[in-house]
Image: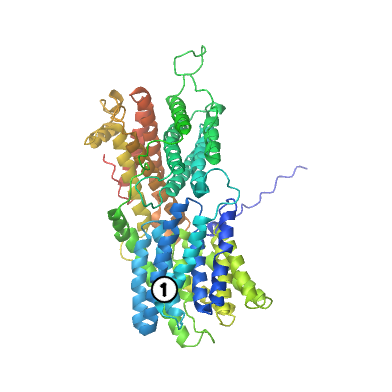
């Protein structure tokens, strides 16, 4: 008797907002950051105790802890801005919060904190460093107002700065373990530039395969990271030493290689395996701070000595060979003439547009409402003695600040991770507090948690658990009783508050942050397309011809950049287009993983990002082909028309994103 197979019901798909809570970054352990973390918060607390100023030592440890959260891989000079700007904002917030808490009653204090939340929320829309500065401003303001102390505000602010500054000094002075090649001051920059060459090789290997798109996105991320690592503040207008000039020249040499590799990815045809060997050897040379040695022989130009029946060499492959040859020359020279980084600077006007745009206004209102409401509730609970014997009420508003941050992930994911991390951290500390000797055990616990922060930043729940243990240890070291149960209750209350505020209707259109980033990506893609395809002032006519299919466009003339030597401008436009696209993609990914009530406000934006991505990829392929032949093929023109027509269709179909691509 034949038995029919039993059909099992399919398991329900995990909703995006829940799946995101279980995602974690996978990166090597940053041992250098682990060492700095161990030497920062714990010793800062110890120094305060030895000087008889334990309260100031606690604030110094908090400053070191918050700086450790921002201590990411990259150049040492870039870390001055990445750590220093948020720390300065935190000191200002602590100063303002201390004096406001000492001189104002509950209602005026709540209004002041709400105004700070509005300003910090708008500033956070400018970029990652501004977002970190806004976070530290509000967290430190809550600590200053909600942690009464006998020390004057200026001393507390200086102690906070001292803790963060100590970590920054360690970041600038300590060499990276295992990094012995070249000048150790530039080990972060070398690793970042080498990562660009590795990403180029990976993209060349993936050309024509299923992973090509993901590898192209990884190349964009590597270029962004290297660009940030090399673009730190400097006293002079150009690199001051040979090692830094050499790194700048090697990064510049990677840009035409990245362009050619992107064109190969667009062509969709496999390339010989040896094509990736050259970038791999250049990556090894950057890491060793040495010459690249012999590189693979170039592919034969089309029509020269080809075997009968052999396919012609792709123009993008010839461009890769040419770029590899020029890179080898740059490596052999050691250093080239410094022309500055190939990047379009984002000036104050653009920062103001971001802060006061739709995204900045929406985020500022939500931060202000969450921060102000949480401060008001915390003060009411404090006066009602809900907190018990201790006098601190800052935990609730400080928790709300982290929960309302959209760059830390979707709202539901943040709430789940924060609640789970706080419960775990509070329970762990409750067990450790009963066993550890005081104060030595608490100092050691703070040092261990400081070392764990760089690893815990891979997941928000893990980071929350480590920070909870560290802060509870600091509270007990400052003479307060054990407060694990109260912290759990305040965290759950903050989670409920932020969930409610996050779903409240606000003035204007929802999803403003996503739309602002998409508009910036559309503008950058448009500028890049016009630069490649037409002389200045003729971009709209070129686009109109592409959409209508009329002749007489870029296929019939030499590209304007071909002989004029403005490729640096082209690469700057290309970098800006891909960078803004990556920022938009991240915002769209976070928005798509929200609860359905929030995710529906950004529906369709992923299709716009994909169309813009195809347009920028095709524009890059056109640039490489025009360099090689001076003309575009029907395939290039067709793909350009398709991308522009898709963007026009999406805009007509109701996707409310301002796209400056003219039809």
- Kindly identify which residue carries mark 1: 94
541 lies left or right of 301? left
The mark tally for this picture is 1
Q: Which element type, helix, strand or loop, lies under badge 1?
A: helix
- Residue 210 in view: no
Residue 212 placement (x, y as % from top left): 50, 37
> Residue visible at 51% across and 16% down?
310
> Residue visible at 55% across and 33% down?
281
Residue 606 placement (x, y as % from top left): 42, 48
- Residue 545 in view: yes
The quadrant in which residue 355 appears is bottom left
Q: Vertically, is 156 above or below 565?
A: below
Q: Nearer the viewer, residue 507 or 294?
A: 294
> Residue visible at 21% across and 36% down?
537
Q: Vertically, is 231 above or below 637?
A: below
The type of colouring in the image is: rainbow
Quadrant of image for the N terminus? top right
The quadrant in which residue 267 appears is top left
Q: Residues within 10 Å of mark 1 (few under 14, many from 20)?
A: many
Q: Specify the farthest residue to the left.
A: 537
Q: Nearer the viewer, residue 24 or 471?
A: 471
């Amino acid at each position: 008797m034949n038995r029919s197979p039993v059909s099992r019901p399919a398991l329900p798909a995990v909703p995006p907002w829940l799946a995101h809570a279980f995602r974690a970054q996978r990166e090597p352990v940053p041992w250098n950051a682990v060492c700095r973390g161990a030497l920062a918060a714990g010793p800062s607390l110890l120094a305060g105790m030895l000087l008889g100023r334990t309260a100031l030592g606690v604030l110094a440890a908090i400053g070191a802890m918050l700086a450790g959260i921002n201590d990411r891989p990259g150049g040492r000079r870039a870390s001055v801005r990445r750590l220093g700007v948020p720390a300065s904002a935190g000191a200002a917030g602590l100063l303002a919060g201390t004096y406001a808490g000492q001189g104002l009653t509950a209602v005026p204090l709540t209004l002041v904190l709400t105004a700070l939340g509005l300003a910090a929320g708008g500033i956070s829309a400018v970029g990652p460093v501004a977002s970190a500065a806004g976070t530290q401003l509000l967290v430190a303001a809550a600590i200053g107002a909600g942690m009464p102390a006998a020390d004057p505000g200026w001393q507390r602010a200086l102690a906070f700065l001292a803790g963060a500054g100590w970590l920054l000094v360690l970041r600038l002075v300590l060499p990276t373990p295992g990094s012995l090649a070249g000048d150790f001051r530039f080990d972060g920059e070398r690793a970042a530039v080498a990562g660009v060459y590795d990403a180029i090789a990976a993209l060349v290997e993936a050309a024509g395969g299923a992973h090509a798109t993901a590898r192209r996105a990884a190349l964009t991320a590597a270029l962004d990271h290297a660009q940030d690592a090399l673009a730190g503040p400097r006293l002079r207008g150009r690199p001051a030493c040979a090692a830094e000039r050499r790194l700048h020249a090697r990064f510049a040499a990677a840009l035409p290689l990245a362009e050619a590799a992107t064109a190969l990815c667009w062509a969709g045809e496999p390339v010989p395996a040896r094509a990736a060997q050259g970038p791999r050897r250049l990556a090894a040379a950057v890491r060793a701070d040495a010459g690249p040695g012999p590189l693979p022989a170039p592919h034969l130009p089309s029509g020269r000595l080809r075997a009968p029946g052999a396919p012609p060499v792709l123009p993008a492959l010839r461009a890769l060979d040419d770029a590899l040859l020029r890179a080898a020359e740059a490596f052999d020279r050691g250093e080239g003439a410094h022309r500055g980084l190939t990047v379009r600077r984002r000036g104050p006007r653009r920062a103001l547009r971001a802060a006061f745009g739709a995204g900045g206004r929406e985020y500022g209102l939500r931060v202000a409402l969450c921060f102000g409401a949480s401060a008001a509730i915390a003060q009411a609970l404090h006066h009602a003695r809900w907190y018990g014997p201790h006098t601190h009420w800052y935990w609730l508003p400080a928790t709300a600040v982290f929960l309302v941050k959209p760059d830390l992930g979707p709202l539901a994911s943040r709430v789940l991770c924060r609640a789970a991390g706080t419960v775990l951290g509070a329970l762990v500390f409750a067990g450790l507090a009963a066993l550890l000797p005081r104060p030595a055990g608490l100092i050691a616990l703070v040092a261990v948690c400081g070392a764990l922060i760089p690893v815990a930043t891979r997941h928000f729940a893990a980071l929350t658990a480590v920070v909870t243990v560290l802060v509870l240890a600091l509270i007990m070291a400052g003479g307060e009783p054990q407060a694990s149960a109260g912290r759990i209750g305040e965290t759950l209350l903050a989670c409920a508050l932020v969930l409610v505020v996050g779903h409240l209707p606000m003035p204007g259109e929802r999803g403003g942050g996503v739309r602002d980033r998409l508009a910036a990506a559309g503008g950058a893609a448009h500028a890049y397309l016009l630069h490649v395809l037409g002389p200045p002032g003729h971009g709209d006519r070129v686009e109109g011809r592409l959409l209508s299919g009329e002749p007489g466009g870029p296929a019939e003339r030499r590209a304007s950049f071909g002989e004029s030597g403005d490729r640096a401008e082209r690469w700057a436009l290309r970098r800006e287009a891909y960078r803004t696209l990556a920022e938009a993609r991240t915002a769209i990914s976070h928005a798509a993983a929200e609860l359905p009530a929030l995710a529906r406000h950004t529906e369709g934006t992923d299709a716009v990002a994909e169309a813009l991505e195809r347009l920028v990829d095709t524009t890059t392929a056109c640039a490489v082909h025009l360099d090689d032949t001076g003309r575009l093929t029907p395939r290039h023109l067709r793909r350009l028309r398709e991308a522009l027509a898709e963007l026009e269709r999406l805009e007509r179909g109701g996707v409310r994103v301002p796209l400056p691509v003219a039809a």
